[in-house]
Image (cartoon, helix red, strand yellow):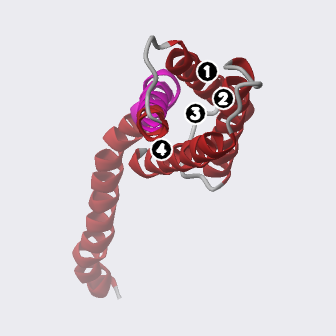
């Protein structure tokens, strides 16, 4: 149920982070320091995550229970992605050794996309989906009763005229 939206989110985060890391490798400067690129990267990636989730909610690819507000879910997802990306970028800058730009980029892309999607699923989307599935299970348990009741009614509606028809023909 959530595999397609989570795959879309994963790919959009991975593509965005790849583009940002390529731009940083091309235009990096020692004058910027570790803080500005880290905050810029985390901000852009979290805004992309908010935009993707907002579109998935609008297109009903993610259905939330009625108590959940889409704006709060999108904001929480943005916060999760921002925190993970900021931690990843600061950690890469604080390593005692220097990674090649490509290795750092690949590590950042995979770690950001995987951790973000896993945390978003378990913290936000799974509880909302579980509540919807529980409600569906409650309604599904009544469907056999409704179907069997309709079947019994149709049988009764067919058999009653067959039983009463001979009696009505003798009355005339």
Q: Is residue 163 above or below residue 96?
A: below
Rendered location of residue 29, percent (x, y):
71, 32
Residue position for label 2: 42
Q: Which residues are magenta?
A: 109-135
- Where residue 122 is drawn, which disc sits there? none
**113 is within the stretch colored magenta:** yes
Q: Earlier in the sequence, mark 1 or mark 2?
A: 2
Image marks 3 and 2: residues in contact by CB distance under 8 Å: no
Which numbered mark, 4 or 3, is in the foreground of this view?
A: 4
Name the residue located 50 percent from the left edge and 28 percent from the top edge. Answer: 120
Name the residue located 69 percent from the left edge and 42 percent from the top edge. Answer: 27
Residue position for label 1: 86
Please tell me whether mark 2 sits on a helix, a strand or a loop.
helix
Please tell me whether mark 1 sits on a helix, a strand or a loop.
helix
Q: Earlier in the sequence, mark 4 or mark 3?
A: 4
Q: Earlier in the sequence, mark 2 or mark 4?
A: 4
Name the residue located 50 percent from the left edge and 31 percent from the top edge. Answer: 125
Image marks 1 and 4: residues in contact by CB distance under 8 Å: no
Q: Earlier in the sequence, mark 3 or mark 2?
A: 2
Q: Is residue 68 above or below residue 49?
A: above
Image marks 1 and 2: residues in contact by CB distance under 8 Å: yes
Rendered location of residue 47, percent (x, y):
71, 38
Rendered location of residue 79, percent (x, y):
66, 23
Measured in 3D between alpha carbons, the distance from the residue under mark 1 to the one under mark 2, in whole angstroms, is 5 Å
Image quarter for residue 25? top right
Residue position for label 4: 10
Name the residue located 47 percent from the left edge and 44 percent from the top edge. Answer: 10
Magenta region, main secondary structure = helix
Residue position for label 3: 65
Measured in 3D between alpha carbons, the distance from the residue under mark 1 to the one under mark 3, in whole angstroms, is 30 Å
């Amino acid at each position: 149920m959530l595999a397609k939206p989570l795959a879309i989110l994963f790919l959009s985060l991975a593509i965005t982070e790849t583009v940002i890391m390529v731009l940083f490798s091309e235009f990096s400067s020692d004058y910027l320091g570790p803080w500005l690129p880290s905050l810029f990267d985390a901000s852009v990636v979290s805004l992309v995550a908010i935009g993707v989730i907002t579109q998935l909610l609008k297109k009903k690819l993610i259905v939330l229970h009625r108590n959940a507000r889409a704006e709060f879910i999108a904001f929480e997802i943005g916060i999760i992605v921002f925190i993970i990306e900021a931690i990843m970028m600061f950690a890469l800058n604080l390593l005692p050794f220097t990674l090649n730009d490509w290795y750092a980029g690949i590590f950042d892309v995979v770690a950001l996309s995987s951790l973000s999607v896993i945390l978003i699923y378990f913290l936000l989307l799974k509880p909302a989906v579980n509540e919807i599935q529980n409600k569906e299970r409650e309604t599904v348990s009544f469907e056999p009763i409704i179907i069997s009741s309709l079947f019994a009614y149709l049988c009764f509606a067919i058999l009653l005229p067959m039983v009463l028809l001979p009696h009505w023909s003798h009355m005339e």
